[in-house]
Image (spheres, rainbow, N blue to C red):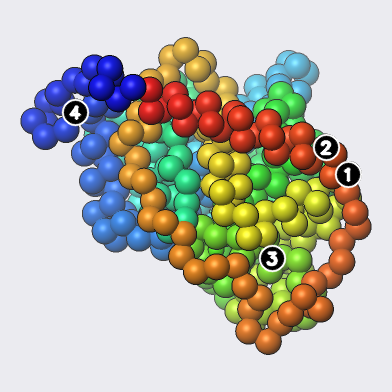
Amino acid sequence: YAALTRRVACPDGVNTATNAACCQLFAVREDLQQNLFHGGLCTAEAHESLRLTFHDGIAISPALQSQGQFGGGGADGSISIFPDIETGFHPNIGLDEIVALQQPLFERHNLSHADFLHFAGAIAASNCAGAPQLVAYVGRKDATQPAPDGLVPEPFHTPDQIFDRLADASQGEFDPILTVWLLTAHTVAAANDVDPTESGLPFDSTPELWDTQFFLETQLRGTAFPGSGGNQGEVESPLAGEMRLQSDHTIARDSRTACEWQSFVDNQPKAQAMFQFVFNVLTTLGQDQNDLVNCTEVVPIPAPPQGHTHFPAGLTIADIEQAPQASPGIDLKRQVLGVQLSERLVRNVVS
Ligand code: HEB
Ligand code: CA
């Protein structure tokens, strides 16, 4: 169908786009890659930019709203518009840095704060080999007030607390299974502030690769803390230098999610398609889809996956901590649904 698609010439004289509104994103992409992501790398700034999309998007609560309180605007850029307020919230610890680093780039372009923040997240992920191409939109409305505190999950929250919060934010769309899909992001992640004595402690042995090591390594029996012990939200990890969040540990073992968690191991297509789907939902929460122009064509197609899923040196299947069985019937249903939805998403992008 490509031949039938009418393209417009962009004012930059170089690029073409399916919609003129997407033209400005080429320069934003270039600026991000050169001046924030070190020429297109999957390093700390990319990780933090992806994390930022979650902390912006998830801050919306129909439940609060129905009690007559402001419930936050979701993917509305509020964390970057009101940084002094929102980066002071406890779960947003450390995000002040990436918000400050993004600000001068934001000022050089003409996007809404919300579009800039979520576009930066999509470009960030594209720098990680094996990642899916994530959706990009222009047309989001910016926040006019900060989100209230208490809407971003903490690593010391129970699965029930996390499942309830994600379901509230998404009007039921993010159920426990989709929560697992969202946590694929922790394959390119590290913690700087959970352990005050150490920073840059990754959640898997390959924080620069979008692979499924995270889903394998979180199932291994924890044996030690990488730095100081006794930190809120941290449990023992199986590898020196690796951090394990309590929330990742418990969701990997919860009877509602253990099967789904295990199903990601060595399933690279799933780690791509499912996250592609939930990122689309996450980064449009609180926005009207009809206002948005899909500009995913501007997001680079990430490098193919590198390496293959493996037990870290010295560890074997005997080091897996057996989780209770879940109900595979439900998982399978959601899995099929997710693939269909994400294929539709891809088709929309291509056609
Ligand atoms: Fe995440 C990181 C938690 C979800 C993405 N995390 C992180 C951390 C924590 C968390 C604690 C660390 C921080 C520091 O620095 O210290 N998460 C969490 C929780 C949850 C989550 C609790 C719920 C369950 N995430 C999530 C999602 C996403 C994410 C959904 C997507 C988007 N994260 C992330 C990233 C990171 C993180 C990317 C990394 C960052 C860096 O590296 O820096
Ligand atoms: Ca990884």
User: Which of these two is toward me, 198 or 3?
Assistant: 3
Which residue reaches farthest bottom?
314
Task: Work out whether residue 261 can be spotted.
Answer: yes
Name the side, left or right, on which 349 lies relative to 223. Answer: left
Q: Which residue is mark 2?
A: 330
User: Which of marks 3 and 2 precedes in the sequence?
Assistant: 3
Residue 265 percent coordinates (x, y): 67, 59
Q: Quadrant of the C terminus?
A: top left
Of label 1 and label 3, which has the lower sequence position? 3
Residue nearest the viewer, comparing 2 with 281 = 2
Q: Nearer the viewer, residue 339 or 43?
A: 339
Residue at left 24%, top 17%? 6
Q: Which residue is mark 4?
A: 16
Residue 335: x and y in percent read 70, 38
Alpha carbon separation for disc pair 2 and 3? 21 Å
Relative to 158, is 153 on the left or the right?
left
Q: Is mark 1 within 8 Å of ligand 1?
A: no
Q: Residues within 10 Å of mark 2 (few under 14, many from 20)?
A: few
Q: Are marks 2 and 1 in contact (CB under 8 Å)?
A: yes
351 above or below 84?
A: above
Q: Read off the residue under disc 3.
A: 216
Q: Which residue is mark 1?
A: 327
On whether ligand 1 comes within 8 Å of the CB at mark 4, the answer is no
Q: Earlier in the sequence, mark 4 or mark 3?
A: 4
Judge the density around disc 1: few (<14), some (14-19), many (≥20) Cα neighbours within 10 Å. few
Q: How many marks?
A: 4
For the residue labelled by badge 3, is the local secondary structure a helix, a strand or a loop?
Answer: helix
Q: CA distance from mark 2 to mark 4?
A: 43 Å
